[in-house]
Amino acid sequence: QVQLVESGGGLVQAGGSLRLSCAASGLPFSNWAMGWFRQAPGKGREFVSIIRKNGRTRFAELVEGRFTISKDNAKNTLYLQMNSLKPDDTAVYYCAGVDDSKWYETRPSEFRYWGQGTQVTVSS
């Protein structure tokens, strides 16, 4: 059974930083592309970032230069370092897994596995 469990969310002031973690079990973590999505109240789920099994990364334009994605295959853990946070970054953040051949995907429907989400709130 595949399980993705996010942690590290919370309340932070604008300009601050947070590091999200996603602990994975039950899937060949090192062979999958792993991504982060977010969903703000009243909005759809949007792509944030993805990291391929070879370590190549991609970011949404809104977060490029502020967020960093990484993973530790030995710990089966995915990370999202978020710096220079803005109130518009407020959302529930989800980690998700997709076959590495679909690493270019940004559509949530293409991602097979999902965590339960962690709330990030950025105050102005």
Image (tube, grey):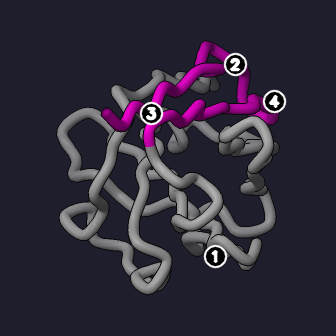
Q: Are marks 3 and 1 in contact (CB under 8 Å)?
A: no
User: Residue under circle 4?
Assistant: 16
Q: Quadrant of residue 47?
A: bottom left
From the image, tell me which residue sits under label 3: 4
Image coordinates for residue 55, horizontal then vertical, percent: 76, 72
Name which residue type carries label 4. Gly
State left or right for residue 17 relative to residue 90: right
Q: CA distance from mark 1 to mark 4?
A: 22 Å
Q: Nearer the viewer, mark 3 or mark 2?
A: 3
Foreground disc of the pair 1, 4: 1
Marked residue nearer the N-terminal end (1 or 2): 2
Question: Spatial distance from mark 3 to mark 2, Cα to Cα?
Answer: 24 Å
* Amino acid tagged 1: Arg
Mark nearer the N terminus (3 vs 4): 3
Name, please, the residue furthest toward the top: 11
Q: Nearer the viewer, residue 85 or 119?
A: 119
Q: Is residue 24 above or below residue 105?
A: above
Going from N to C along the chain, the mark reached first, 3 or 1, is 3
Between residue 25 and residue 91, name the one nearer to us. 25
Badge 2, how many Cα within 10 Å: few under 14, some, many 20+? some
Q: Measure the C-alpha gap from mark 4 to mark 2.
A: 6 Å
